[in-house]
Image (cartoon, helix red, strand yellow):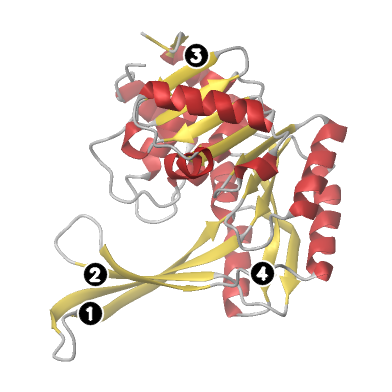
Amino acid sequence: MAICGIEKEALLAALPKLRGLDVLVLGDLVLDEYVVGRATRLSREAPVPVLEFLRRFFLPGGAANPAQNVSALRSTAHQVGVVGDDDSGRELVNHLQRAGIRTDGLVVDRSRPTTTKTRILAEGTLVFPQQLARIDQAQHSPLGQDSVSQLVTHLGEEGARVDALLISDYKMGVVNEQTIAAALRVCRERRIILTVDSQGDLLKFRGFDVVKCNRREAEALLGRELRKDSDYEEAGASLLADLGSAAVILTRGDEGMSLVSEGGGNFHIPAANRSEVFDVTGAGDTVIAVVTLALAAGLEIVEAALLANYAAGLVVRKLGNATPSEEELGWAIEHWPEPRV
């Protein structure tokens, strides 16, 4: 059965094409810390559970997560971003290097700490621990000019050897007017794909090939609610015209995603997996990583969106920032039903 006119066999045949590519990932880097305990009683000091410590672990987050997704699908990610001169920064760099991610483009900024998000989890009888609280250590102030200049230099150097450039904006200073201009310049000179996973401020990404945002971000920009498929089609068409992009992807949580592209291609793709959703952290990072890889491999935007939809359905079944393997994607395409578009 065809999905958006594309047979499952075509999607399966496309998976090997995602291997062996080089993608530059620019954005705000985050170290995700997980502190897991077992709830034993309620505190006498406040109406909160007392957790007995079980374990602590770290995962790369922010713009490091799409880079991990690229690496997990057997391509090479070139990370460009900023870390602090601290233990968290060193922990993050070690994780990236162990994942096979190139870290030549990292800037160490001694004036600001590495962004760290600490999640407190309570483990019990459920499949996954439940998050009780999150503590963020982050700076949202603009980067110093020295760090920005280094990022621009790295974009030029790393951009000379990649097949696509992906920007992941978590609004912590790395994605700014100068780095956006440098990314546009590199991609135009080399005629390579330029994509972005935005966190609002969509209009600063004019001229990008693909812009991805979620429903809340699109509603904030357009000043209206998006409820029906027709609302998303109109929103996508408006954004497409304002941004001058080839495609806009609007993610809709458990409703899947909507794709509006040049030439009148409008598709609503329901979520591939709605029954085993345990943690939605990082699903959007997976979507933009898979879309970028697929387009760099020469696939059509509809094929890219379908593959990304399956990939997102896989990672929400796992705890924390997760990545799908090629084998897992193949399993999902084969075993999950075709979404009714």
Looking at the picture, how far across and down is residue 164, in whole percent?
A: 71, 36
Relative horizontal placement of residue 236, taking residue 48 as reference (left or right): right
Q: Sequence order check: which comes first, mark 4 or mark 1?
A: 1
Q: Residue 209: which quarter of the image? A: top right
Q: Sequence order check: which comes first, mark 3 or mark 4?
A: 3
Answer whether labels 1 and 3 touch (C-beta < 8 Å): no
Visible in this render: residue 327? Answer: no
Residue occupied by mark 2: 122
Give the amino acid type for the residue marked by disc 2 in the picture.
Answer: Ala
Residue 188 to residue 106: above or below: above
Residue depicted at 65% across the width and 31% down the height:
242
Residue occupied by mark 1: 51
Residue depicted at 62% across the width and 73% down the height:
90
Dot 3 surroundings within 10 Å: few (below 14), some, or many (20 or more)? few
Q: What's the CA distance linking mark 3 and mark 2?
A: 43 Å
Residue depicted at 55% across the width and 57% down the height:
62
Give the amino acid type for the residue marked by disc 1 in the picture.
Answer: Leu
Nearer the viewer's eye, disc 3 or disc 4?
4
Q: Sequence order check: which comes first, mark 1 or mark 2?
A: 1
Marker disc for residue 83? 4
Dot 1 surroundings within 10 Å: few (below 14), some, or many (20 or more)? some
Relative horizontal placement of residue 267, taking residue 280 as reference (left or right): right
> What quarter of the picture does the C terminus occupy?
top left
Q: Sequence order check: which comes first, mark 3 or mark 2?
A: 3
Answer whether labels 1 and 2 touch (C-beta < 8 Å): yes
Q: What's the CA distance linking mark 4 and mark 1?
A: 31 Å
Looking at the picture, how far across and down is residue 322, in whole percent?
A: 44, 50
Visible in this render: residue 231? Answer: yes
Label 3: state its secondary structure. helix
Dot 4 surroundings within 10 Å: few (below 14), some, or many (20 or more)? many
Label 4: state its secondary structure. strand
